[in-house]
Protein backbone atom coordinates (compact mmCIF):
# COMPACT_ATOMS: atom_id res chain seq x y z
CA UNK A 1 0.00 0.00 0.00
CA UNK A 2 1.31 3.39 -0.87
CA UNK A 3 0.54 6.69 0.74
CA UNK A 4 -1.43 8.89 -1.58
CA UNK A 5 -0.27 12.36 -2.49
CA UNK A 6 -2.64 15.15 -1.53
CA UNK A 7 -3.29 16.20 -5.11
CA UNK A 8 -3.56 12.99 -7.07
CA UNK A 9 -3.95 9.26 -6.51
CA UNK A 10 -0.69 7.37 -6.23
CA UNK A 11 0.35 5.85 -9.54
CA UNK A 12 1.87 2.90 -7.73
CA UNK A 13 -1.40 2.30 -5.94
CA UNK A 14 -3.32 2.56 -9.21
CA UNK A 15 -1.01 0.02 -10.85
CA UNK A 16 -1.48 -2.34 -7.94
CA UNK A 17 -5.24 -2.03 -8.18
CA UNK A 18 -5.23 -2.48 -11.96
CA UNK A 19 -4.36 -6.16 -11.39
CA UNK A 20 -7.89 -7.06 -10.34
CA UNK A 21 -10.97 -5.35 -11.71
CA UNK A 22 -13.57 -8.10 -11.68
CA UNK A 23 -16.80 -8.93 -9.97
CA UNK A 24 -15.06 -11.97 -8.49
CA UNK A 25 -13.39 -9.60 -6.04
CA UNK A 26 -16.68 -9.66 -4.13
CA UNK A 27 -15.60 -13.14 -3.03
CA UNK A 28 -13.50 -11.32 -0.47
CA UNK A 29 -16.73 -10.77 1.47
CA UNK A 30 -17.38 -14.48 1.97
CA UNK A 31 -15.43 -14.76 5.28
CA UNK A 32 -17.82 -12.16 6.70
CA UNK A 33 -20.91 -13.83 5.19
CA UNK A 34 -20.03 -17.37 6.28
CA UNK A 35 -21.23 -17.05 9.90
CA UNK A 36 -24.72 -16.15 8.67
CA UNK A 37 -25.43 -19.12 6.40
CA UNK A 38 -28.91 -19.72 7.87
CA UNK A 39 -29.93 -16.14 7.19
CA UNK A 40 -28.58 -16.45 3.63
CA UNK A 41 -30.58 -19.67 3.09
CA UNK A 42 -33.80 -18.08 4.38
CA UNK A 43 -33.24 -15.00 2.22
CA UNK A 44 -32.61 -17.23 -0.81
CA UNK A 45 -35.84 -19.12 -0.10
CA UNK A 46 -37.80 -15.85 0.06
CA UNK A 47 -36.07 -14.70 -3.12
CA UNK A 48 -36.97 -17.85 -5.06
CA UNK A 49 -40.52 -17.74 -3.70
CA UNK A 50 -41.15 -14.16 -4.85
CA UNK A 51 -39.50 -14.73 -8.23
CA UNK A 52 -41.58 -17.89 -8.75
CA UNK A 53 -44.82 -16.12 -7.87
CA UNK A 54 -43.94 -13.29 -10.28
CA UNK A 55 -43.43 -15.84 -13.06
CA UNK A 56 -46.75 -17.59 -12.33
CA UNK A 57 -48.85 -14.43 -12.67
CA UNK A 58 -48.70 -14.21 -16.52
CA UNK A 59 -49.99 -17.80 -16.75
CA UNK A 60 -53.02 -16.80 -14.71
CA UNK A 61 -53.52 -13.71 -16.87
CA UNK A 62 -53.55 -15.87 -20.03
CA UNK A 63 -56.22 -18.14 -18.61
CA UNK A 64 -58.36 -15.17 -17.65
CA UNK A 65 -57.98 -13.51 -21.07
CA UNK A 66 -58.59 -16.64 -23.11
CA UNK A 67 -61.46 -17.88 -20.94
CA UNK A 68 -63.10 -14.54 -20.17
CA UNK A 69 -65.91 -14.80 -22.70
CA UNK A 70 -67.11 -18.22 -21.52
CA UNK A 71 -66.37 -17.86 -17.81
CA UNK A 72 -69.15 -17.85 -15.21
CA UNK A 73 -69.26 -15.41 -12.30
CA UNK A 74 -68.12 -18.18 -9.96
CA UNK A 75 -65.06 -18.95 -12.06
CA UNK A 76 -64.20 -15.26 -12.32
CA UNK A 77 -64.54 -14.90 -8.53
CA UNK A 78 -62.22 -17.87 -8.06
CA UNK A 79 -59.67 -16.38 -10.48
CA UNK A 80 -59.59 -13.05 -8.69
CA UNK A 81 -59.54 -14.60 -5.21
CA UNK A 82 -56.57 -16.69 -6.33
CA UNK A 83 -54.93 -13.53 -7.68
CA UNK A 84 -55.51 -11.82 -4.32
CA UNK A 85 -53.97 -14.77 -2.45
CA UNK A 86 -50.97 -14.71 -4.78
CA UNK A 87 -50.57 -10.96 -4.24
CA UNK A 88 -50.61 -11.41 -0.44
CA UNK A 89 -48.10 -14.24 -0.68
CA UNK A 90 -45.91 -12.09 -2.91
CA UNK A 91 -46.09 -9.22 -0.40
CA UNK A 92 -45.14 -11.49 2.51
CA UNK A 93 -42.27 -13.03 0.56
CA UNK A 94 -40.99 -9.62 -0.53
CA UNK A 95 -41.16 -8.28 3.03
CA UNK A 96 -39.35 -11.33 4.35
CA UNK A 97 -36.67 -11.01 1.67
CA UNK A 98 -36.19 -7.30 2.39
CA UNK A 99 -35.89 -7.85 6.14
CA UNK A 100 -33.43 -10.73 5.91
CA UNK A 101 -31.24 -9.24 3.20
CA UNK A 102 -31.12 -5.77 4.74
CA UNK A 103 -30.38 -7.14 8.19
CA UNK A 104 -27.67 -9.36 6.73
CA UNK A 105 -26.11 -6.35 4.98
CA UNK A 106 -26.11 -4.24 8.14
CA UNK A 107 -24.64 -7.09 10.20
CA UNK A 108 -21.87 -7.89 7.71
CA UNK A 109 -20.89 -4.24 7.24
CA UNK A 110 -20.75 -3.77 11.02
CA UNK A 111 -18.46 -6.82 11.21
CA UNK A 112 -16.26 -5.45 8.43
CA UNK A 113 -15.95 -2.05 10.10
CA UNK A 114 -15.08 -3.69 13.41
CA UNK A 115 -12.49 -5.93 11.73
CA UNK A 116 -10.95 -2.99 9.86
CA UNK A 117 -10.68 -0.83 12.97
CA UNK A 118 -9.30 -3.72 15.02
CA UNK A 119 -6.69 -4.29 12.32
CA UNK A 120 -5.70 -0.66 11.83
CA UNK A 121 -5.58 0.37 15.51
CA UNK A 122 -2.87 -2.22 16.12
CA UNK A 123 -0.69 -1.25 13.16
CA UNK A 124 2.74 0.22 13.87
CA UNK A 125 3.70 3.80 12.88
CA UNK A 126 5.44 2.32 9.81
CA UNK A 127 2.01 1.63 8.33
CA UNK A 128 0.82 5.20 8.83
CA UNK A 129 3.93 6.58 7.16
CA UNK A 130 2.63 5.09 3.92
CA UNK A 131 -1.09 5.79 4.06
CA UNK A 132 -3.07 8.84 5.11
CA UNK A 133 -5.44 8.52 8.05
CA UNK A 134 -8.15 10.12 5.89
CA UNK A 135 -7.86 7.31 3.34
CA UNK A 136 -8.24 4.71 6.08
CA UNK A 137 -11.37 6.51 7.30
CA UNK A 138 -12.67 6.66 3.73
CA UNK A 139 -12.35 2.90 3.44
CA UNK A 140 -14.07 2.31 6.77
CA UNK A 141 -16.97 4.62 5.87
CA UNK A 142 -17.40 5.20 2.12
CA UNK A 143 -16.26 1.78 0.93
CA UNK A 144 -18.27 -0.11 3.53
CA UNK A 145 -21.33 1.95 2.58
CA UNK A 146 -20.95 0.62 -0.97
CA UNK A 147 -20.71 -2.90 0.42
CA UNK A 148 -23.89 -2.30 2.42
CA UNK A 149 -25.68 -1.18 -0.73
CA UNK A 150 -24.65 -4.34 -2.52
CA UNK A 151 -25.34 -6.90 0.21
CA UNK A 152 -28.48 -5.19 1.44
CA UNK A 153 -29.97 -4.50 -1.98
CA UNK A 154 -28.05 -4.95 -5.22
CA UNK A 155 -27.15 -8.65 -4.89
CA UNK A 156 -30.71 -9.54 -3.88
CA UNK A 157 -32.20 -7.54 -6.75
CA UNK A 158 -29.62 -8.94 -9.18
CA UNK A 159 -30.37 -12.55 -8.22
CA UNK A 160 -34.11 -11.93 -8.43
CA UNK A 161 -33.70 -10.47 -11.91
CA UNK A 162 -31.49 -13.38 -12.96
CA UNK A 163 -34.21 -15.81 -11.86
CA UNK A 164 -36.89 -13.80 -13.64
CA UNK A 165 -34.71 -13.56 -16.74
CA UNK A 166 -34.03 -17.30 -16.88
CA UNK A 167 -37.54 -18.35 -15.84
CA UNK A 168 -39.17 -15.82 -18.14
CA UNK A 169 -37.01 -16.96 -21.03
CA UNK A 170 -38.03 -20.59 -20.53
CA UNK A 171 -41.72 -19.67 -20.30
CA UNK A 172 -41.39 -17.45 -23.38
CA UNK A 173 -40.09 -20.47 -25.31
CA UNK A 174 -42.98 -22.52 -23.91
CA UNK A 175 -45.45 -19.84 -25.03
CA UNK A 176 -44.04 -19.24 -28.53
CA UNK A 177 -40.77 -20.70 -29.78
CA UNK A 178 -40.96 -18.57 -32.93
CA UNK A 179 -41.28 -15.23 -31.14
CA UNK A 180 -38.72 -16.29 -28.51
CA UNK A 181 -36.20 -17.07 -31.25
CA UNK A 182 -36.65 -13.57 -32.65
CA UNK A 183 -36.15 -12.07 -29.16
CA UNK A 184 -32.96 -14.08 -28.64
CA UNK A 185 -31.48 -12.54 -31.76
CA UNK A 186 -31.40 -9.25 -29.84
CA UNK A 187 -29.39 -10.68 -26.91
CA UNK A 188 -25.89 -10.44 -28.52
CA UNK A 189 -26.58 -6.80 -29.43
CA UNK A 190 -27.39 -6.10 -25.78
CA UNK A 191 -24.50 -8.06 -24.22
CA UNK A 192 -21.74 -6.50 -26.35
CA UNK A 193 -22.20 -2.90 -25.06
CA UNK A 194 -22.55 -4.21 -21.50
CA UNK A 195 -19.17 -5.94 -21.77
CA UNK A 196 -17.36 -3.13 -23.60
CA UNK A 197 -18.74 -0.25 -21.55
CA UNK A 198 -18.56 -2.32 -18.36
CA UNK A 199 -14.77 -2.51 -18.62
CA UNK A 200 -14.57 1.26 -18.92
CA UNK A 201 -16.99 1.61 -16.02
CA UNK A 202 -14.80 -0.53 -13.74
CA UNK A 203 -11.77 1.68 -14.38
CA UNK A 204 -13.74 4.86 -13.74
CA UNK A 205 -15.33 3.42 -10.59
CA UNK A 206 -11.94 2.65 -9.03
CA UNK A 207 -10.57 6.02 -10.07
CA UNK A 208 -13.57 7.75 -8.49
CA UNK A 209 -13.08 5.87 -5.23
CA UNK A 210 -9.39 6.81 -5.18
CA UNK A 211 -10.22 10.49 -5.56
CA UNK A 212 -12.82 10.26 -2.78
CA UNK A 213 -10.15 8.77 -0.49
CA UNK A 214 -7.70 11.56 -1.39
CA UNK A 215 -10.39 14.18 -0.72
CA UNK A 216 -11.16 12.64 2.65
CA UNK A 217 -7.47 12.54 3.57
CA UNK A 218 -6.99 16.15 2.55
CA UNK A 219 -9.95 17.32 4.64
CA UNK A 220 -8.93 15.23 7.64
CA UNK A 221 -5.40 16.66 7.61
CA UNK A 222 -6.59 20.27 7.39
CA UNK A 223 -9.37 19.95 9.99
CA UNK A 224 -7.16 18.15 12.50
CA UNK A 225 -4.79 21.16 12.36
CA UNK A 226 -7.44 23.85 11.95
CA UNK A 227 -5.89 26.25 14.47
CA UNK A 228 -2.53 26.18 12.68
CA UNK A 229 -4.31 26.70 9.36
CA UNK A 230 -6.14 29.71 10.72
CA UNK A 231 -3.11 31.10 12.55
CA UNK A 232 -1.17 31.30 9.28
CA UNK A 233 -4.26 32.54 7.35
CA UNK A 234 -4.01 29.46 5.16
CA UNK A 235 -7.79 29.00 4.90
CA UNK A 236 -8.05 30.15 1.27
CA UNK A 237 -5.17 27.93 0.17
CA UNK A 238 -6.70 24.98 2.04
CA UNK A 239 -10.07 25.62 0.41
CA UNK A 240 -8.44 25.84 -3.01
CA UNK A 241 -6.53 22.62 -2.46
CA UNK A 242 -9.60 20.78 -1.19
CA UNK A 243 -11.75 22.18 -4.01
CA UNK A 244 -9.24 21.00 -6.62
CA UNK A 245 -9.28 17.45 -5.25
CA UNK A 246 -13.07 17.47 -4.87
CA UNK A 247 -13.51 18.74 -8.44
CA UNK A 248 -11.25 15.94 -9.70
CA UNK A 249 -13.44 13.52 -7.79
CA UNK A 250 -16.53 15.09 -9.36
CA UNK A 251 -15.06 14.94 -12.88
CA UNK A 252 -14.17 11.30 -12.35
CA UNK A 253 -17.71 10.62 -11.07
CA UNK A 254 -19.19 12.53 -14.01
CA UNK A 255 -17.31 10.32 -16.47
CA UNK A 256 -18.47 7.23 -14.59
CA UNK A 257 -22.08 8.40 -14.52
CA UNK A 258 -21.95 9.39 -18.20
CA UNK A 259 -20.59 6.00 -19.21
CA UNK A 260 -23.24 4.24 -17.19
CA UNK A 261 -25.97 6.44 -18.66
CA UNK A 262 -24.81 5.67 -22.22
CA UNK A 263 -24.79 1.96 -21.42
CA UNK A 264 -28.31 2.19 -19.98
CA UNK A 265 -29.62 4.07 -23.03
CA UNK A 266 -28.13 1.57 -25.47
CA UNK A 267 -29.32 -1.48 -23.56
CA UNK A 268 -32.88 -0.26 -22.95
CA UNK A 269 -33.26 1.09 -26.50
CA UNK A 270 -32.12 -2.20 -28.03
CA UNK A 271 -34.28 -4.30 -25.72
CA UNK A 272 -37.53 -2.43 -26.16
CA UNK A 273 -37.00 -1.89 -29.88
CA UNK A 274 -36.70 -5.63 -30.20
CA UNK A 275 -39.80 -6.18 -28.06
CA UNK A 276 -41.82 -3.78 -30.22
CA UNK A 277 -40.67 -5.59 -33.35
CA UNK A 278 -41.58 -8.96 -31.89
CA UNK A 279 -45.00 -7.66 -30.85
CA UNK A 280 -45.64 -6.48 -34.37
CA UNK A 281 -44.99 -10.00 -35.62
CA UNK A 282 -47.07 -11.46 -32.77
CA UNK A 283 -50.10 -9.38 -33.66
CA UNK A 284 -49.91 -10.60 -37.23
CA UNK A 285 -49.92 -14.20 -35.85
CA UNK A 286 -53.03 -13.42 -33.75
CA UNK A 287 -54.81 -11.98 -36.76
CA UNK A 288 -54.00 -15.16 -38.72
CA UNK A 289 -55.18 -17.35 -35.77
CA UNK A 290 -51.71 -18.88 -35.29
CA UNK A 291 -51.84 -17.97 -31.55
CA UNK A 292 -54.48 -16.76 -29.08
CA UNK A 293 -54.71 -13.25 -27.72
CA UNK A 294 -54.11 -14.69 -24.22
CA UNK A 295 -50.91 -16.36 -25.38
CA UNK A 296 -49.73 -13.09 -26.92
CA UNK A 297 -50.54 -11.21 -23.69
CA UNK A 298 -48.67 -13.88 -21.74
CA UNK A 299 -45.70 -13.60 -24.10
CA UNK A 300 -45.76 -9.80 -23.89
CA UNK A 301 -45.72 -9.89 -20.09
CA UNK A 302 -42.81 -12.33 -20.06
CA UNK A 303 -41.00 -10.24 -22.68
CA UNK A 304 -41.41 -7.11 -20.54
CA UNK A 305 -40.27 -9.03 -17.45
CA UNK A 306 -37.21 -10.40 -19.24
CA UNK A 307 -36.42 -7.02 -20.80
CA UNK A 308 -36.85 -5.30 -17.44
CA UNK A 309 -34.62 -7.89 -15.81
CA UNK A 310 -31.86 -7.32 -18.37
CA UNK A 311 -32.20 -3.55 -18.01
CA UNK A 312 -32.05 -3.81 -14.22
CA UNK A 313 -29.03 -6.11 -14.43
CA UNK A 314 -27.20 -3.55 -16.58
CA UNK A 315 -27.88 -0.96 -13.86
CA UNK A 316 -26.90 -3.28 -11.03
CA UNK A 317 -23.77 -4.36 -12.89
CA UNK A 318 -22.27 -0.93 -12.37
CA UNK A 319 -23.08 -1.06 -8.65
CA UNK A 320 -21.52 -4.50 -8.36
CA UNK A 321 -18.38 -3.26 -10.09
CA UNK A 322 -18.08 -0.33 -7.71
CA UNK A 323 -18.59 -2.68 -4.77
CA UNK A 324 -16.00 -5.06 -6.20
CA UNK A 325 -13.53 -2.18 -6.25
CA UNK A 326 -14.45 -1.24 -2.70
CA UNK A 327 -14.04 -4.85 -1.60
CA UNK A 328 -10.56 -4.96 -3.09
CA UNK A 329 -9.64 -1.85 -1.15
CA UNK A 330 -11.00 -3.27 2.10
CA UNK A 331 -9.25 -6.60 1.59
CA UNK A 332 -6.01 -4.71 0.90
CA UNK A 333 -6.37 -3.01 4.26
CA UNK A 334 -7.28 -6.21 6.11
CA UNK A 335 -4.35 -8.06 4.55
CA UNK A 336 -1.83 -5.22 4.86
CA UNK A 337 1.39 -6.51 6.35
CA UNK A 338 2.79 -4.76 9.39
CA UNK A 339 6.58 -4.65 9.52
CA UNK A 340 6.38 -4.76 13.31
CA UNK A 341 4.59 -7.98 14.26
CA UNK A 342 4.22 -10.11 17.35
CA UNK A 343 6.04 -13.45 17.24
CA UNK A 344 4.01 -16.55 16.39
CA UNK A 345 4.78 -17.99 19.83
CA UNK A 346 5.54 -15.05 22.12
CA UNK A 347 7.42 -15.51 25.34
CA UNK A 348 5.94 -14.25 28.59
CA UNK A 349 7.51 -11.27 30.31
CA UNK A 350 8.63 -12.42 33.78
CA UNK A 351 6.52 -10.95 36.58
CA UNK A 352 7.08 -8.65 38.26
CA UNK A 353 8.88 -6.55 35.64
CA UNK A 354 12.05 -5.09 37.15
CA UNK A 355 12.56 -2.48 34.41
CA UNK A 356 16.10 -3.22 33.22
CA UNK A 357 16.48 -1.82 29.69
CA UNK A 358 19.39 -2.44 27.37
CA UNK A 359 20.34 -1.43 23.84
CA UNK A 360 22.71 -4.00 22.42
CA UNK A 361 24.63 -2.54 19.46
CA UNK A 362 21.46 -0.98 18.05
CA UNK A 363 21.39 0.80 14.70
CA UNK A 364 18.21 2.15 13.16
CA UNK A 365 16.92 3.95 10.08
CA UNK A 366 13.33 5.12 9.71
CA UNK A 367 11.57 3.33 6.82
CA UNK A 368 10.60 6.69 5.30
CA UNK A 369 14.28 7.79 5.38
CA UNK A 370 16.29 4.63 4.71
CA UNK A 371 19.49 6.50 3.78
CA UNK A 372 19.57 8.60 6.94
CA UNK A 373 20.93 6.97 10.12
CA UNK A 374 18.80 7.74 13.19
CA UNK A 375 20.84 5.62 15.62
CA UNK A 376 24.23 4.04 15.04
CA UNK A 377 25.71 1.22 17.14
CA UNK A 378 24.09 2.28 20.40
CA UNK A 379 25.07 0.34 23.51
CA UNK A 380 23.20 1.47 26.60
CA UNK A 381 22.29 -0.37 29.79
CA UNK A 382 19.78 1.11 32.21
CA UNK A 383 19.46 -0.55 35.60
CA UNK A 384 16.11 -1.17 37.32
CA UNK A 385 15.00 1.93 39.19
CA UNK A 386 17.61 4.15 37.54
CA UNK A 387 16.70 7.61 36.26
CA UNK A 388 18.45 8.34 32.98
CA UNK A 389 18.18 11.62 31.07
CA UNK A 390 18.74 11.82 27.31
CA UNK A 391 19.97 15.21 26.11
CA UNK A 392 21.28 16.64 22.87
CA UNK A 393 20.21 18.79 19.94
CA UNK A 394 17.00 18.16 17.98
CA UNK A 395 17.33 15.16 15.66
CA UNK A 396 20.09 13.59 17.74
CA UNK A 397 18.13 10.35 18.25
CA UNK A 398 16.62 10.84 21.71
CA UNK A 399 12.98 10.34 20.71
CA UNK A 400 14.00 7.35 18.60
CA UNK A 401 15.19 5.66 21.79
CA UNK A 402 11.70 6.14 23.25
CA UNK A 403 10.10 4.77 20.04
CA UNK A 404 12.25 1.63 20.10
CA UNK A 405 11.62 0.97 23.80
CA UNK A 406 7.89 0.84 22.99
CA UNK A 407 8.64 -1.24 19.88
CA UNK A 408 6.87 1.11 17.50
CA UNK A 409 9.79 0.20 15.25
CA UNK A 410 12.32 -2.61 15.21
CA UNK A 411 16.04 -1.83 15.09
CA UNK A 412 17.78 -2.36 11.77
CA UNK A 413 20.59 -4.06 13.70
CA UNK A 414 21.05 -5.17 17.28
CA UNK A 415 18.38 -5.70 19.94
CA UNK A 416 16.38 -3.76 22.51
CA UNK A 417 15.80 -5.77 25.70
CA UNK A 418 13.57 -5.53 28.75
CA UNK A 419 14.82 -7.52 31.74
CA UNK A 420 17.17 -9.33 29.37
CA UNK A 421 14.42 -10.39 26.94
CA UNK A 422 14.47 -9.20 23.32
CA UNK A 423 11.29 -7.20 22.72
CA UNK A 424 10.83 -8.99 19.40
CA UNK A 425 10.27 -12.23 21.31
CA UNK A 426 7.41 -10.83 23.38
CA UNK A 427 3.85 -9.75 22.61
CA UNK A 428 3.76 -5.96 22.29
CA UNK A 429 0.66 -5.66 24.47
CA UNK A 430 2.38 -7.76 27.14
CA UNK A 431 5.44 -5.59 27.71
CA UNK A 432 3.72 -2.26 26.98
CA UNK A 433 1.58 -2.77 30.08
CA UNK A 434 4.80 -2.19 32.01
CA UNK A 435 5.41 1.22 30.39
CA UNK A 436 3.87 4.63 31.11
CA UNK A 437 4.44 7.44 28.62
CA UNK A 438 4.15 11.21 28.82
CA UNK A 439 4.69 12.50 25.25
CA UNK A 440 5.84 15.97 24.32
CA UNK A 441 2.55 16.63 22.50
CA UNK A 442 -0.04 15.56 25.03
CA UNK A 443 -2.89 13.58 23.48
CA UNK A 444 -6.32 14.36 24.94
CA UNK A 445 -9.36 12.51 23.61
CA UNK A 446 -12.87 13.82 22.95
CA UNK A 447 -14.20 12.66 26.32
CA UNK A 448 -14.41 13.88 29.90
CA UNK A 449 -11.34 14.83 31.91
CA UNK A 450 -11.95 11.82 34.17
CA UNK A 451 -12.09 9.42 31.21
CA UNK A 452 -8.90 10.92 29.79
CA UNK A 453 -6.99 10.29 33.02
CA UNK A 454 -8.54 6.83 33.46
CA UNK A 455 -7.17 5.96 30.00
CA UNK A 456 -3.96 5.08 31.88
CA UNK A 457 -5.73 2.36 33.88
CA UNK A 458 -9.38 1.72 32.88
CA UNK A 459 -10.23 -0.19 36.05
CA UNK A 460 -9.10 2.65 38.36
CA UNK A 461 -11.62 4.09 40.80
CA UNK A 462 -12.69 7.73 40.88
CA UNK A 463 -10.64 8.24 44.04
CA UNK A 464 -7.51 6.90 42.32
CA UNK A 465 -8.15 9.16 39.32
CA UNK A 466 -8.40 12.21 41.54
CA UNK A 467 -5.33 11.19 43.52
CA UNK A 468 -3.33 10.97 40.27
CA UNK A 469 -4.66 14.37 39.22
CA UNK A 470 -3.53 15.90 42.54
CA UNK A 471 -0.06 14.40 42.08
CA UNK A 472 0.11 15.94 38.60
CA UNK A 473 -1.01 19.38 39.88
CA UNK A 474 -4.17 19.05 37.79
CA UNK A 475 -6.84 18.79 40.50
CA UNK A 476 -7.19 22.52 41.08
CA UNK A 477 -8.02 23.47 37.46
CA UNK A 478 -10.12 20.34 36.92
CA UNK A 479 -12.26 21.10 39.95
CA UNK A 480 -13.02 24.56 38.53
CA UNK A 481 -14.35 23.23 35.21
CA UNK A 482 -18.15 23.50 34.73
CA UNK A 483 -18.75 19.84 35.57
CA UNK A 484 -15.49 19.20 37.35
CA UNK A 485 -13.80 15.96 36.34
CA UNK A 486 -16.85 15.05 34.25
CA UNK A 487 -16.46 18.06 31.94
CA UNK A 488 -16.26 17.21 28.25
CA UNK A 489 -12.93 18.65 27.05
CA UNK A 490 -13.63 18.64 23.29
CA UNK A 491 -11.90 17.01 20.34
CA UNK A 492 -8.12 16.89 20.95
CA UNK A 493 -8.78 18.75 24.20
CA UNK A 494 -9.57 22.07 22.50
CA UNK A 495 -11.16 23.40 25.71
CA UNK A 496 -7.86 23.08 27.59
CA UNK A 497 -4.59 24.99 27.43
CA UNK A 498 -1.37 23.26 26.44
CA UNK A 499 -0.21 23.11 30.05
CA UNK A 500 -3.54 21.69 31.23
CA UNK A 501 -3.44 18.96 28.59
CA UNK A 502 0.14 18.14 29.63
CA UNK A 503 -0.89 17.77 33.29
CA UNK A 504 -3.73 15.42 32.28
CA UNK A 505 -1.18 13.34 30.35
CA UNK A 506 1.07 13.25 33.42
CA UNK A 507 -1.85 12.25 35.65
CA UNK A 508 -2.62 9.46 33.19
CA UNK A 509 0.96 8.17 33.47
CA UNK A 510 0.89 8.42 37.28
CA UNK A 511 -2.35 6.42 37.36
CA UNK A 512 -0.84 3.71 35.16
CA UNK A 513 1.69 2.96 37.93
CA UNK A 514 4.07 1.14 35.57
CA UNK A 515 7.63 0.02 36.41
CA UNK A 516 9.05 1.89 33.37
CA UNK A 517 8.36 5.58 32.94
CA UNK A 518 9.09 7.46 29.71
CA UNK A 519 9.01 11.26 29.82
CA UNK A 520 9.43 13.06 26.50
CA UNK A 521 9.68 16.78 27.35
CA UNK A 522 6.97 16.16 29.93
CA UNK A 523 7.11 19.66 31.46
CA UNK A 524 7.83 21.65 28.30
CA UNK A 525 4.32 23.16 28.10
CA UNK A 526 4.08 24.19 31.76
CA UNK A 527 4.55 27.55 33.41
CA UNK A 528 7.21 27.92 36.11
CA UNK A 529 4.86 27.26 39.05
CA UNK A 530 3.18 24.25 37.43
CA UNK A 531 6.56 22.92 36.33
CA UNK A 532 7.83 23.08 39.92
CA UNK A 533 4.76 21.21 41.19
CA UNK A 534 4.79 18.61 38.41
CA UNK A 535 8.56 18.13 38.65
CA UNK A 536 8.11 17.27 42.32
CA UNK A 537 5.38 14.79 41.35
CA UNK A 538 7.58 13.29 38.64
CA UNK A 539 10.50 12.95 41.04
CA UNK A 540 8.21 11.19 43.51
CA UNK A 541 6.77 8.96 40.77
CA UNK A 542 10.27 8.03 39.54
CA UNK A 543 11.19 6.53 42.90
CA UNK A 544 11.64 2.80 42.44
CA UNK A 545 10.91 2.99 38.69
CA UNK A 546 13.14 2.91 35.67
CA UNK A 547 12.74 6.41 34.31
CA UNK A 548 13.95 7.77 30.99
CA UNK A 549 13.66 11.52 30.54
CA UNK A 550 14.11 13.52 27.35
CA UNK A 551 14.62 17.21 28.03
CA UNK A 552 16.13 20.24 26.38
CA UNK A 553 16.03 22.23 29.61
CA UNK A 554 18.96 20.80 31.55
CA UNK A 555 17.64 22.16 34.85
CA UNK A 556 14.94 19.47 34.77
CA UNK A 557 17.46 16.60 34.45
CA UNK A 558 20.34 17.97 36.51
CA UNK A 559 19.63 15.56 39.36
CA UNK A 560 19.20 12.43 37.18
CA UNK A 561 21.25 9.39 38.15
CA UNK A 562 22.87 9.50 34.74
CA UNK A 563 22.80 11.83 31.76
CA UNK A 564 23.43 10.42 28.28
CA UNK A 565 24.47 12.92 25.60
CA UNK A 566 23.36 12.19 22.03
CA UNK A 567 24.37 13.80 18.75
CA UNK A 568 23.72 12.60 15.18
CA UNK A 569 22.48 9.20 16.37
CA UNK A 570 25.52 8.43 18.52
CA UNK A 571 26.29 8.54 22.25
CA UNK A 572 28.95 11.17 22.84
CA UNK A 573 29.21 10.94 26.60
CA UNK A 574 27.42 9.86 29.75
CA UNK A 575 27.73 10.58 33.45
CA UNK A 576 26.38 12.89 36.11
CA UNK A 577 25.81 16.61 35.52
CA UNK A 578 29.01 17.59 37.31
CA UNK A 579 31.07 14.93 35.50
CA UNK A 580 29.83 16.00 32.08
CA UNK A 581 30.42 19.69 32.79
CA UNK A 582 33.93 18.85 33.91
CA UNK A 583 34.59 16.83 30.73
CA UNK A 584 33.71 19.75 28.47
CA UNK A 585 32.23 19.00 25.06
CA UNK A 586 28.66 19.34 23.86
CA UNK A 587 26.97 19.01 27.28
CA UNK A 588 29.25 21.56 28.87
CA UNK A 589 28.49 24.02 26.07
CA UNK A 590 24.72 23.45 26.45
CA UNK A 591 24.96 23.84 30.23
CA UNK A 592 26.96 27.04 29.90
CA UNK A 593 24.44 28.51 27.46
CA UNK A 594 21.37 27.57 29.52
CA UNK A 595 22.58 28.23 33.03
CA UNK A 596 24.55 31.38 32.15
CA UNK A 597 21.57 32.79 30.21
CA UNK A 598 19.29 31.86 33.09
CA UNK A 599 21.43 33.69 35.62
CA UNK A 600 21.73 36.70 33.30
CA UNK A 601 17.96 36.78 32.88
CA UNK A 602 17.49 36.71 36.63
Image (cartoon, grey):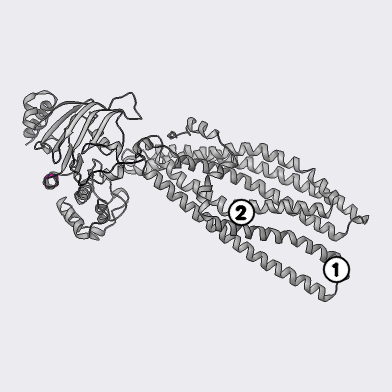
Q: Residue at x 49, y 30 (%)?
A: 11
Residue that label 1 marks: 68
User: Which stretch is magenta?
Assistant: 539-544
Camera-side residue of 7 and 213: 213
Q: Are marks 2 and 1 in contact (CB under 8 Å)?
A: no
Magenta span main SS: helix
Q: Residue at x 71, y 67 (%)?
A: 86
Mark 2 = which residue?
A: 156
Q: Which residue shows up at 45% across the image and 49% down it?
A: 113
Q: Which quadrant holds the N terminus?
A: top left
Which percent across, then down, holds residue 594? 11, 32
Q: Is residue 177 left or right of residue 149?
A: right
Q: Is residue 238 magenta?
A: no
Instruction: Report which quarter residue 66 is drawn in.
Output: bottom right
Q: Secondary structure at mark 1?
A: loop
Q: Can you say which quadrant of the picture contains the C terminus?
A: top left
Q: Residue 419 got which mark?
A: none
User: Secondary structure under badge 2?
Assistant: helix
Does 51 appear above or below 208? below
Locate residue 233, reporting x and y percent: 34, 39
Quadrant of the image occupied by residue 371: top left
Left or right position of 233 against 437: right
Q: Is residue 537 visible?
A: yes
Amino acid sequence: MARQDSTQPSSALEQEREKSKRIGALGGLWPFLRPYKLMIVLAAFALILTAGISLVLPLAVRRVVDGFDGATDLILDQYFLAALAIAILLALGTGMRYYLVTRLGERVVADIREALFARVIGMSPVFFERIMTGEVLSRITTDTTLILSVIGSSVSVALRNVLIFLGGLVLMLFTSAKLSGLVLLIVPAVIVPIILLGRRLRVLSRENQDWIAVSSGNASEALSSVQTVQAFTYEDASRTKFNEVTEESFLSAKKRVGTRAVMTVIVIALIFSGVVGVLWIGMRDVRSDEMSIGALVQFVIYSVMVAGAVGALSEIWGELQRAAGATERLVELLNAKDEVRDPAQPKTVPAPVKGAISFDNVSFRYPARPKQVALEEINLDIAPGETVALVGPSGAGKSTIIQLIQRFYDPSEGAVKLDGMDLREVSRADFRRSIALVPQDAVVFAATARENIRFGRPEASDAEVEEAARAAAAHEFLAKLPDGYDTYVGERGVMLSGGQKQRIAIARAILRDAPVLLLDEATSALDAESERLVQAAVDQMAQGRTTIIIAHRLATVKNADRIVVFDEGCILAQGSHDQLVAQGGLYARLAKLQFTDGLAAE
